[in-house]
Image (cartoon, rainbow, N blue to C red):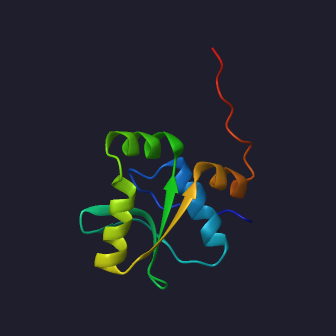
């Protein structure tokens, strides 16, 4: 009881899986890793035409550092070209939803 079937998707991160499980429990029907043009969204709610993104700090920060403005450009493309609403969750927000303790910094 209380378990959620997680779809098997190759690039599906633990963070995305956790967000999927939480949102499914709220009654949403989601599809993981759906492509819109040149971009893939983490989770897609077809009924409400909403993309949900699990923004892990490491990759999100790395991509933004390597390609400044990447996420703003990507969101604009998804909104303007495909009419999507895009909702972002940070890793800390997902940890809180899951009841996980916050990540601790490793001190050398």
Q: Position of residue 22 (x, y in %)?
A: 64, 64
89 in relation to 58, above or below = below
In this view, the residue farthest toward the left is 38
Q: Residue at x 24, y 63 (%)?
A: 38
Relative depth, front residue between 21 and 93:
93
Can residue 68 be spotted in the picture?
A: yes
Q: Is residue 65 left or right of residue 57?
A: left
Q: Position of residue 67 (x, y in %)?
A: 31, 45
38 in relation to 70, above or below = below
In this view, the residue farthest toward the top is 108
Q: Residue at x 33, y 61 (%)?
A: 73
In this view, the residue farthest toward the front is 68
Q: Residue at x 28, y 77 (%)?
A: 81
Quadrant for residue 104, please give it: top right
Relative depth, front residue between 84 and 68:
68
Quadrant for residue 84, please give it: bottom left
Can residue 5 be spotted in the picture?
A: no
Q: Residue at x 32, y 77 (%)?
A: 80
Q: Is residue 76 left or right of residue 1?
A: left
């Amino acid at each position: 009881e209380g378990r959620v079937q997680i779809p098997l998707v190759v690039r599906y991160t633990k963070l995305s899986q956790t967000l999927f499980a939480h949102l499914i429990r709220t009654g949403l029907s989601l599809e993981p890793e759906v492509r819109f043009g040149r971009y893939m969204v983490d989770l897609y709610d077809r009924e409400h035409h909403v993309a949900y993104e699990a923004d892990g700090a490491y990759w999100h920060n790395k991509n933004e550092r390597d390609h400044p403005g990447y996420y703003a450009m990507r969101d604009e493309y998804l909104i303007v070209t495909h009419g999507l609403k895009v909702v972002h969750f940070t890793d800390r927000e997902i940890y809180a939803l899951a009841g996980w303790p916050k990540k601790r910094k490793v001190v050398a």
